[in-house]
Image (cartoon, rainbow, N blue to C red):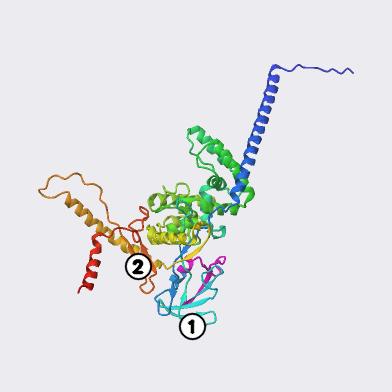
Amino acid sequence: MALKIKFRMPTHRTGWASLALRIGLIVVAAAAVTVLTVGGYFYVKYQHIVDERLKQPLFKNTAKIFAEPREVRPGQKLSIHLIAEELRQANYTLVGTQKDSPMGTYSESDGAITVYPGPQSYHAQDSATIHVSDGVVQSIADDHNQALASYELEPVLITGLSEDANRTKRRLITYDEIPQNLVQAVLAVEDRRFFEHGGVNYFRLMEAVFRDLTTGQKQQGGSTLTMQLARGFFLTPEKRIKRKIIEIVITFQLEHRFTKKQIFELYANQINLGQRGSFAINGFGEAAQSYFGKDVRQLDLAESALLAGMIQRPNYFSPFRHPDRAIERRNLVLDSMVETGAITKSLAERAQAEPLHLSTASVDASEAPYFVDLVHEQLLQKIGERDSNLEGLRIYTTLDPDLQRVATAAVDSTIHVVDEQVEKLHARHNAKKGAAPQPPPGPITYPQVALVALNPHTGQVLALVGGRSYGNSQVNHAVAHRPTGSIFKPFVYAAAFQTAV
């Protein structure tokens, strides 16, 4: 039996296909080597930079300024609700509802509220029970049921000192203090797969690159929370290919060093959320206080969605300046939460029907900035050249928060009356009957204002308003040195009459 073997010469088409395959493999290999080389270079280079940055605290532990503690006495008009609200503002937690706060806890019963100061409290850790009936404090007893003549509640935090020359304000919070509604709201609009991916959402990133290339504009983000964090701590916001590569490299290092909860906590403290007066608001802790007058743990669903919606463009969606935009963006976030399964449609609809419950837009009332600046100046005088912002000091003052709000409201409600009189005089001066034509009126210079409330027995400052608008001018007219002029004449005449023979 004969065996026939046929040999065939490769066709021209097969040769070209083989050559193309080889060239393709070479190109892929070269690209892989290039990517590994460049990536390795940037990884080693920025690993050192990240190491150096993480040797220092990521956030400054600025000095905190506290108000005078409220004294509760029998016979005082005060409700359990108001006492509990003030304790919550001082970061106390209700027993059994969440993790105990190191500042302290409290419990409520029928007609009474019991206060338990914690290890970080201003007071000794001695509890007290306050009995209230019909809005009046009836009695106060210590933990041994002995009657007390009075009891001081925890001093409320007025504000922390700004971190830098940019007047950044921040209230540090932990992941456990962030409401789950706020976590889910952020994930719904910023990074839905945050707890699943390794720092980079490749599909979303490639989609953003494709849209940028097709539109010719660098507008698409594609950044995960970790990438945003890397950019915020280590890079500038400019959009360049090299910067994006570095951002991804740093992202991998952050994902390697921290857990997902730690990364979200850093993000929650770092993110910028707009402006309040002359201060920049950074972090959800400061934003909750600035926009709603609440501790972050007290935020409801609608408020959480509003803050999450502001991340994209905080000044554009500012609820103080653009309430309609803010509500529209908040409702979009709530719809996104329904899509992710975080909340039900009915919950979203109820939250979307909520109006904006914002705190007063006057930063002077909530934080007493002129008073805080005065405290800061005295602090610098006492500690010399040391950086007070890094000391983590707790400064207890004599400010009465209720009286400060009343003082600010009094100024706001009366200064416009003076302004109207100034405008009338200005108009009258430029429209006299029979007078020669006057030149066009110049800009009106409105008068400034100052108010100081003192304790007449001790001289302690209880409230201070140093000007008509702290956002426009930080000059404290209550203590500014100015020539007295003719206003001093009554004192001269009084002294002359008293010494006259």
* Quadrant into which the N terminus falls: top right
Position of residue 324 relative to residue 492, above or below, is above
Q: Residue at x 48, y 81 (%)?
A: 148
Q: Where is residue 479 drawn, in percent x and y?
A: 35, 61
Image disc number at residue 147: 1
- Residue lying furthest left in this view? 434
Q: Is residue 351 visible?
A: yes
Can you identify the residue that label 2 sits on?
453
As shown in the figure, which amino acid type bears the numbered disc 1? Ala
Q: Label 1: how many residues lie within 10 Å, few (<14), some (14-19) or many (20+)?
A: few
Q: Classify residue 340 as left or right of residue 79.
A: right
Q: Classify residue 333 as left or right of residue 411.
A: right
Q: Residue at x 43, y 57 (%)?
A: 291
Q: Where is residue 335 drawn, in percent x and y?
A: 48, 50
Q: Is residue 231 magenta?
A: no
As shown in the figure, which amino acid type bears the numbered disc 2? Ala
Q: Residue at x 50, y 65 (%)?
A: 91
Segment colored magenta = 86-112
Q: Classify residue 98 as left or right of residue 494.
A: right
